[in-house]
Image: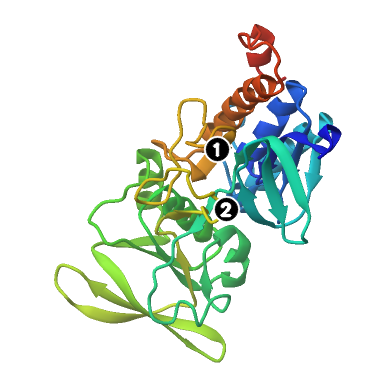
Amino acid sequence: MQEEGIYDLIIVGGGPAGLSAGIYALRATLKTVLVEKGLHGGQVAMTDSVENYPGFENVSGMELCDKFLNHAKSYGLEMIQQEVAAVEPGIDYHTVRLSDGKALHSHAVILATGGYHRKLNAPGEEEHGGKGVSYCATCDGFFYRDKTVVVVGGGDTAAEESLYLAKIAEKVYLVHRRDELRASRILQQRVLSECKIEVLWNTVVTAIKADAQGVNSIGLKNVRTGEERELPAYGIFIFVGFVPNNQLVPAGVKMNAEGYVLSDEKCETSIPGIFVVGDLREKYAKQIVLAAADGCTAALAAAHYVESRKGAEVCEVPQSATDKVA
């Protein structure tokens, strides 16, 4: 294997964490490639409005992701649009195998594969996917102008998407299995003061029903009284949690019971040279700013790791390496 054919770093995933890692890796002069099977930005790109990323009072998710991407490209980040089939740790080099059969080799790997929305597993959910069942209000809200829709969940995402849908739909029912929302206080206040949104407390979805045109009603049950009813609605938007996309995590990397990868303060996993960032990593909160911070941390740590692998003298990261990106 020729040394010049080896990358210093391979980043798997092109969301805020992966793109941030790309920026800092190139600032550290690492030979880097980012592999992403879909569009850049990940889940953030499907968000209508981002209000909590420092420096942007209000920006669309896609616009923010475009800024991440353009910033990374300004450093000359190499990108491959291809699905990753496997990540294989090695003694000399780690290998990332692509679905087209090509194998990439590197000293270090950063896993930034994020996750996906959890499903209700309610009758009718699978059958009517794309026909009234959605996990993205920004993507599909347009189809429900002046109609009645249901949103399921109680966290920030459910609250944000309910508020977005209230701008479009005639009526929004927010179904939550508990008697209080888990969303941030400011979002709770906005939801409860929006006249188009009605919260159905202590309620779960029992079935999603449809006709030839798509979803037409939602079966509901009050978990306290046991009362069941059918609510006419043309669409249901489900936001009941997040599942880490850990299928590419190599055997030997430690994970918690929920499938999130365990790492140290450098974002390094239990296998040397393999790092994890963003929503795949176990941490207190899932926020865009924290994903970007993970990318920075992992890239700087990977730079130290790569230099040690190459036999260079390991020294403190110079102050300039930790400066903010302009």
Q: Residue furthest bottom?
A: 212
Q: Residues within 10 Å of mark 1 (few under 14, many from 20)?
A: many
The front one of 98 and 206 is 98
The N terminus - image quarter: top right
| In this rendering, position of residue 212 left or right of residue 92 | left
Seen at 35% across and 62% down, the residue is 198
The front one of 62 and 314 is 314
Image coloring type: rainbow
Q: Let me know if residue 52 appears in the view.
A: no
Please tell me whether mark 2 sits on a helix, a strand or a loop: loop
Earlier in the chain: of badge 2 and badge 1, it is 2
Amino acid at dot 1: Val
The answer to which image quadrant residue 32 occupies is: top right
From the viewer's perspective, is residue 304 above or below residue 250? above
Residue at image mark 1: 277
Q: Give the CA separation, mark 2 to mark 1.
A: 13 Å
The C terminus - image quarter: top right
**Mark 2 or 1, which is nearer the eye?**
2
Where is residue 142? Give x, y as percent. Answer: 62, 66
Seen at 52% across and 26% down, the residue is 266
Amino acid at dot 2: Leu
The front one of 265 and 18 is 265
Please tell me whether mark 1 sits on a helix, a strand or a loop: loop
Seen at 43% across and 66% down, the residue is 119
Residue at image mark 2: 248
Q: Let me know if residue 9 appears in the view.
A: yes
Where is residue 99? Give x, y as percent. Answer: 72, 61
The front one of 122 and 223 is 122
Where is residue 103? Give x, y as percent. Answer: 75, 51
| In this rendering, position of residue 128 left or right of residue 139 | left
